[in-house]
Image (cartoon, rainbow, N blue to C red):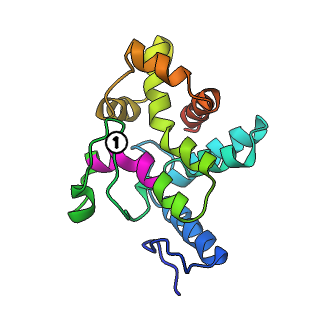
Amino acid sequence: MTVTAMTKPTATMTPEQRVATVFQLLQNASKTSFMGEEITQLEHALQGAQLAKKDGADEATILAILLHDIGHLCPSTEPCTNTSGKVWAAFHKTNVTADINEINHARLGAEYLHKLGFSEKTCELIDSHIVAKRYLSAKDPEYLAKLSVGSKQSLKLHGGPFTPAEMREFEKDPLFKVKVQIRKWEEAAR
């Protein structure tokens, strides 16, 4: 089997093919600008992973920050839902629009990597990196003020800052602190 950036995960893929698939996606990220900023998607991912490693994060967390935006790069495999539970089936049937890709990239990446055999923790952390931005934007006005223009546009697409009720619910999550920290590393990786 030849591995390409558009390879969809299958049960017959060897571990080597799965790793090669992710590496190909990361290589493609070296050619893609990160939200109009002066770094590439790959540089953004590597910087985040380096910050996590420096801070003593576990392997699943380092992988999550490294691969948190992989949903921008991977082929879609199934309809995904956003945090409101709406199905964006059109994402999989037509040309992807930037807005739909942005709304779904965390879920797409998490589902794609789950099919490649990544841990539940890594996939959950990837799926939640947008949720953590919504939380921090509501919790900390300074955080919100420091977001880049591209990140503020993305926040708007995801529903804006959390409501107080959404904040309380998120704070109950057993991985709450890790999810928030991943977001902080993600914002520092610019």
Residue at horizontal 57 percent and vertical 78 percent from the top: 13
Give how far across and how far down residue 95 sits, in percent: 22, 62
Q: Is residue 130 visible?
A: yes
Q: Main secondary structure of the magenta part?
A: helix
Q: Is residue 20 above or below residue 61?
A: below
Question: Residue at (63%, 69%) from the top-left corner?
Answer: 19
**Residue located at (59% from left, 71% from top):** 18
Rendered image quadrant of residue 118: bottom right
Image coordinates of residue 167 in percent, x first then y, are 46, 18
The question of residue 105 being in magenta is answered with yes
Q: Which residue is mark 1?
A: 82
* Residue lying at 49% horizontally and 49% vertically, measured from the top left: 69
> Over which residues does the magenta segment extend?
100-109
Q: Nearer the viewer, residue 80 or 52?
A: 80
- SS of the residue under disc 1: loop
Comparing 115 with 75, the one in front is 115
Specify the quadrant of the image occupied by residue 181. top right
Q: For mark 1, does the 10 Å Cα neighbourhood hold few (<14), some (14 to 19), or many (20 or more) residues?
A: some
| Horizontal arrangement in the rendering, residue 131 relative to residue 163 (left or right) | right
Q: Is residue 164 magenta?
A: no
Q: Which residue extends farthest bottom?
A: 1
Q: Tally the marks.
A: 1
Residue 70 visible in the current orientation: no
Q: Picture coordinates of residue 142 (x, y %)?
A: 49, 13
Which quadrant of the figure contains the C terminus? Answer: top right
Amino acid under label 1?
Asn
